[in-house]
Image: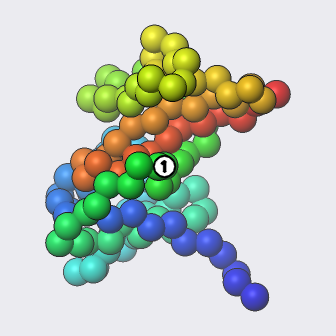
Amino acid sequence: MPTRAVAFVATSNPPDALRFYRDTLGLTLKEDTPFAFVFDAFGTPLRVQKAERVVDAPYTVFGLEVDDVETEVQRLRQLGVTFVLYPHFEQDELGIWTAPGGAKVAWFRDADGNLLSLATRGA
């Protein structure tokens, strides 16, 4: 039986990825090897694999749940993060979409173009 989950994303620019995940998102760096950075993503290891090339996925590859998505979006915007707007979602002025169940989601990209999300659960 599995004992825990491990999340993965890739980077072709390790210095930028290190700054983004450590300094912008505030994750704790646990390990730096020639092959990957390993961050503590609130109890789940996040391996940022050092790759020659990163291929953009059209879907979210890693998400963070937050208590207040509006506050976190504003904090990240102040750090230079740009949020993704989609024509098929009705997003507010901050780029936050409210799902039918009440969850609030905002999408953004890391330095390599990996699509990430912030979300607050609905009622």
> Farthest right residue?
123
On-image quarter of the N terminus: bottom right
Q: Residue at x 47, y 49 (%)?
A: 59
Of 95 and 65, which appears nearest the observer?
95
From what the image shows, is residue 2 above or below residue 106?
Answer: below
From what the image shows, is residue 82 above or below residue 64?
Answer: above
Of 102 and 25, which appears nearest the observer?
102
- x, y percent for residue 117: 50, 41
Q: Residue at x 63, y 28 (%)?
A: 104
The colour mode here is rainbow
* Other-residue count near label 1 (Cα within 10 Å), few / some / many at <14 / 14–19 / ≥20: few
Q: Residue at x 35, y 51 (%)?
A: 114
Residue 22 in sight in this render:
no
> Farthest front residue?
88
Q: Which residue is mark 1?
A: 60
Helix, strand or loop at mark 1: loop
> Farthest bottom residue?
1
- x, y percent for residue 46: 47, 65
Residue 52 in sight in this render:
yes
Q: Quadrant of residue 85?
A: top left
- x, y percent for residue 107: 46, 35
- x, y percent for residue 73: 46, 26
Of 92 and 37, which appears nearest the observer?
92
Does residue 103 appear left or right of residue 53 in this picture? Answer: right
From what the image shows, is residue 14 above or below residue 109?
Answer: below
Three-letter code for the amino acid on which mark 1 is drawn? Thr
Q: Residue at x 70, y 81 (%)?
A: 3
Does residue 81 appear left or right of residue 120 in this picture? Answer: left
